[in-house]
Image (cartoon, rainbow, N blue to C red):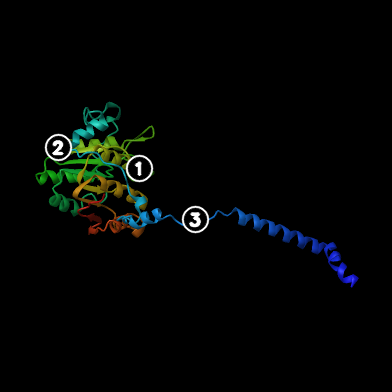
């Protein structure tokens, strides 16, 4: 009987028993402290439940993708050209005294190069919409803008103004394909060549550049109250660029206006422009039509 009473005492003297005892003690203390640190969960208040239940579902299931810039009071179509000249060019047309002496010798009489710039979609939409204002997003050297100006003149729409939104920087390596565009001290002269093309085509009274990135330019046009009956999107062809351009451009579209763009069918398939267009149409319950390589969405009315 004496040996049985002393057994626990001997057991605790072994190394294994000592380690087990320490581990159990540490675990017990750790879990006790963790339990005591847990905050007491309170049931949701009735006020919060009422807010959730009475909140009207938003039409857009991914609202954080939407552009929320507040647009200014609408500028009448006949004042849009002068508004842009005043806001961007300090009241003086960019065609005044063009070309400046320091770039004149670098410019060609005309370099009108574009992709998809002469599709039937342009005449189809201009005939139908009869736009007073067209905004083109992505102009490069002005091929499609000059084509649209020709169409509006031929169709008797003499007052139509075309605003060309582009930073006129091109993209890295584009001069491998267009060596005629001059490069001076690292500055590619796309804007000057664009102006030269417009002047050479005798459309300086109809076409006006907005020489900034699409994001900043569209945001400002919206704030200034500049709107369009027809918007063409043909700038960046990756999904993120096209998605941003579409969502900003729709803010400056007049009710009942038409938005369209190029490169709906490309090697990028559903990873670029087409994905952005389809997602936008799906969210806003709109229908996408196609005209050649172009996509068209009619009567956009997105808040």
Q: What separation in Å lies between label 3 and label 2 (alpha carbons)?
A: 61 Å
Question: Dots 2 and 1: beta carbons under 8 Å?
Answer: no
State the separation of the CA atoms marked 3 and 1. Answer: 65 Å
Q: Dot 3: few (<14), some (14–19), or many (≥20) neighbours within 10 Å?
A: few
The structure residue drawn at horizontal position 39% and vertical position 53%, both measured from the top left corner, is 47
Checking the image for residue 78, the label placed there is 2
Percent position of residue 113, x then y: 26, 45
Q: Depth check: 278 or 26 in front?
A: 26
The earlier-in-sequence mark between 3 and 1 is 3
* Residue assigned mark 3: 42
Look at 38% across and 32% down and name the residue there: 185
* Mark 1 Cα shell of 10 Å, populated few (<14), some (14-19), many (≥20): some
Q: Earlier in the sequence, mark 2 or mark 1?
A: 2
Is residue 238 among the parts visible in the rendering? no
In space, the residues marked 2 and 1 are separated at their CA atoms by 38 Å
Q: Nearer the viewer, mark 3 or mark 2?
A: 3
Rendered image quadrant of residue 17: bottom right
Q: Position of residue 99 (x, y in %)?
A: 24, 30
The image shows residue 77 at horizontal and vertical percentages of: 16, 39
Instruction: From the viewer's side, name the closer residue of 58 and 183.
Output: 58
The one of 112 and 30 positioned closer to us in this rendering: 30
**Closer mark to the observer between disc 3 and disc 1:** 3
| Residue that sits furthest to the right in the current view | 2
Which residue does the image show at 35% across and 55% down from the upper left?
272
Residue at the far left in the pictured view: 156
Residue that numbered label 1 is attached to: 175
Left or right: residue 25 compared with residue 141: right
């Amino acid at each position: 009987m004496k040996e049985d009473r002393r057994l626990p005492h001997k057991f605790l003297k072994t190394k294994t028993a000592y380690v087990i005892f320490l581990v159990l003690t540490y675990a017990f203390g750790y879990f006790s402290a963790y339990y005591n640190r847990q905050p007491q969960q309170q049931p949701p208040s009735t006020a919060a439940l009422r807010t959730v239940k009475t909140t009207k579902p938003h039409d857009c299931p991914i609202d954080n993708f939407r552009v929320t810039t507040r647009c200014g009071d609408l500028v009448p179509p006949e004042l849009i050209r002068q508004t842009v000249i005043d806001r961007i060019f300090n009241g003086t047309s960019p065609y005044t005294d063009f070309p400046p002496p320091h770039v004149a010798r670098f410019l060609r009489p005309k370099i009108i190069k574009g992709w998809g710039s002469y599709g039937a979609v342009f005449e189809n939409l201009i005939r139908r919409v009869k736009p007073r204002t067209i905004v083109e997003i992505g102009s490069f050297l002005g091929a499609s803008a000059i084509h649209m100006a020709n169409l509006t003149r031929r169709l008797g729409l003499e007052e139509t103004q075309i605003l060309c939104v582009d930073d006129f920087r091109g993209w890295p390596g584009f001069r491998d394909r267009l060596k005629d565009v001059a490069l001076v001290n690292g500055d590619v002269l796309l804007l000057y060549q664009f102006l030269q093309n417009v002047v050479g085509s005798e459309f300086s009274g109809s076409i006006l550049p907005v020489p900034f990135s699409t994001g900043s330019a569209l945001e400002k046009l919206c704030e200034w109250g500049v709107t369009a009956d027809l918007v063409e999107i043909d700038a960046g062809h990756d999904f993120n660029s096209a998605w941003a351009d579409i969502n900003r451009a729709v803010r400056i579209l007049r009710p009942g206006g038409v938005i369209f763009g190029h490169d709906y069918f490309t090697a990028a398939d559903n990873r670029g422009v087409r994905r952005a267009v389809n997602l936008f149409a799906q969210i806003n319950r709109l229908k996408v039509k196609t005209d050649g390589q172009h996509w068209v969405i009619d009567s956009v009315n997105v808040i």
